[in-house]
Amino acid sequence: MTPELAARLAAYRIELVTEAKEYTLVARENCFAMLHLGERSVPGIGSAGMITDHGLTYLVWREGEPRLVGKRSNVAAGPQAVEAIRRFAEDLKEAVAGS
């Protein structure tokens, strides 16, 4: 991750959690997403999700209802969780784009 990208993420209170060869896990509060850094000029952003007591979960809509679904869980997502993930994903996109 470049120092410039790290600074833009920090401006949105998004923290680097861990890095691997081409991927970086970022988070804010209990929301997270993976960035694919690779050789692209702009990192690819994976789906945003939420860290819960049952591990990493992703926001999934089933039969019109929001759910937090992970390897070991499938629970209803309340309006606060949906809004937190939405805000995090929007802020992450803006930070990566350089806004």
Image (cartoon, rainbow, N blue to C red):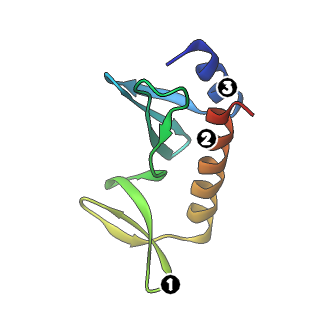
Residue 42 position (above or below residue 90): above
Q: Please report the residue visible at 44 percent of the width from the left and 28 percent of the height from the top.
A: 37
Query: Identity of the amino acid at label 2?
Result: Leu
- The reply, left or right, for residue 36 in relation to residue 96 is left
First in sequence: mark 2 or mark 1? Answer: 1
Residue found farthest to the front = 40
Q: Nearer the viewer, residue 20 or 44?
A: 44
- The reply, left or right, for residue 32 in relation to residue 85 is left
Q: Nearer the viewer, residue 94 or 52?
A: 94
Query: Identity of the amino acid at label 1?
Result: Gly
- The reply, left or right, for residue 15 in relation to residue 12 is left
Residue hosting label 3? 8
Residue hosting label 1? 64
- Label 1 sits on a secondary structure element that is loop
Residue found farthest to the top = 3
Query: How would you rate the neighbour count of disc 3 (Cα within 10 Å): few for under 14, some for 14-19, many for 20 or more?
Result: some
Residue 55 position (above or below residue 78): above
Q: Please report the residue visible at 67 percent of the width from the left and 26 percent of the height from the top.
A: 8
Residue hosting label 2? 92
Residue 75 position (above or below residue 28): below
Pointer 3 with pointer 1, Cβ within 8 A: no
